[in-house]
Image (tube, rainbow, N blue to C red):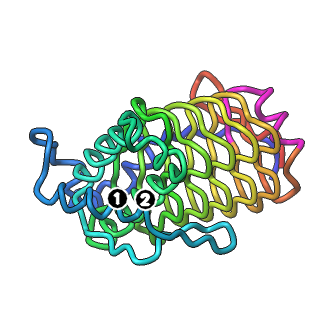
Amino acid sequence: MGCGLALHRSMDDIVKQYEGLVSADAAGKQKVEGNLFAGLDELLKLYEKALWGGMLMSDERVSLPGIRYPALKPEEISRFLLETIAYETDRTRRILFDSAGLRTGVFISGLINASYKAGNRRFRLNTTCLTNADYLGHLARGREGRPLIIEIQGSAGYRSGSYAKHSIISVSGNAGSQFGWYASHCTISIGGDTEWYCCAHARNSTVTIYGSAGEDFGFGAKQCVFKSPKIKTLERIAQNIRKGNKLYLMRPNGKEELVWK
C-alpha cells in the first residue's frame, strides 16, 4: 500500500459509530442532580477500605483484593471521582493518599468495569481539579463491537489506560508516563503532550496525538496506526516503532497522509 490520502475521523466520529448502542446507555442522557447520590456514604467507606487494604500487582497489572465494586451509573462515578479531592486536601489524610494515590485510579477503573458489565459504556471523568490522576482506565475491559468509552477532561496520569482492551479512551490534556501501555484493540486520542513510554507495546490500536510525543512513545507497538498533525511528533514516533505499524500526518484540510509504514 503506497502513500495516499484518507478522510480524517475525529474521536466524536468514532464514538458516533456506536451511537446506536450508546442510546441504551444512560450515560449520554442523564445529568447529575445535586451534589450527592444515594449510596455515596457506603461507597466512601469502600474506598477507604481500598486505600488501607492490600494491593496485588501481577505482571504490572494492579488490583485491590477483597473489593466488590457496585454497579454505579456513569454520572455517579464521575461525581465520586470529585469526592476523592478531599483525600488530597485534608491534612489528616494526606499521608495515606500519598502512600496509596494510585489506588484511587485503580478503584475508579474497577467501578467503570462493573458499570460497563451492568450495561453502561460511556464514562466522563474530570481531572482538572485533581493532583493525582494515575491509573484511570487501567485494565478497562470492553468487548469487540461494544467498546468501553472513557472521556477524560483534563490530563491523565501514570499508566492510565494501561492494559485496556476494546476501549475508546480520549484525554483532552496531557498524558503521563506509560499511558496506554499494552493497550489492545483500542482507539486512543491525546489532546496534549506525553511523557515517556506512552502507548508502548500497544497492539492493534489507533492512537492520535495532537501534542509532542515523549521518549519511547509507541516502543514495541505492533499493528498500530499513529496519527498527528505535527510532523516532528511523527518523526519522534518513527524512531521507536518497527514495520507493521503506520504513521499518518493529519492535514489542516481534514485529510490524512500515510507517511510511514
Q: Give left or right: position of 85 versus 131.
A: left
Please state the horizontal and vertical placement of residue 82, each as a whole percent of the image. Answer: 31, 40
Residue pictured at 85% horizontal, 42% vertical: 238
At label 1, counting other C-alpha atoms closer than 10 Å, the crowd grade (few under 14, some 14-19, many 20 or more) is: some
* Amino acid on which the number 1 mark rests in the picture: Glu
Can you tell which mark lies on residue 51? 2
Q: Is residue 196 above or below residue 63?
A: above
Please state the horizontal and vertical placement of residue 49, each as a whole percent of the image. Answer: 36, 65
* Amino acid on which the number 2 mark rests in the picture: Leu
Location of residue 151 (image quadrant): top left
Task: Please identify the dominant SS of the magenta region.
Answer: helix
Q: Give left or right: position of 128 versus 211.
A: left
Outermost residue, top direction? 252
Look at the numbered discs 1 and 2 and tell me whether their residues touch, using CB distance below 8 Å.
Answer: yes
The magenta stretch spans residue 212: no
Q: Nearer the viewer, residue 40 or 237?
A: 40
Q: Give left or right: position of 200 versus 42.
A: right
Please state the horizontal and vertical placement of residue 200, each as a whole percent of the image. Answer: 74, 54
At label 2, counting other C-alpha atoms closer than 10 Å, the crowd grade (few under 14, some 14-19, many 20 or more) is: many
Task: Give the Cα distance between marks 1 and 2.
Answer: 5 Å
Residue pictured at 47% horizontal, 59% vertical: 106
Q: Which residues are magenta?
A: 227-239
Q: Nearer the viewer, residue 46 or 91?
A: 91
Q: Which residue is mark 1?
A: 48
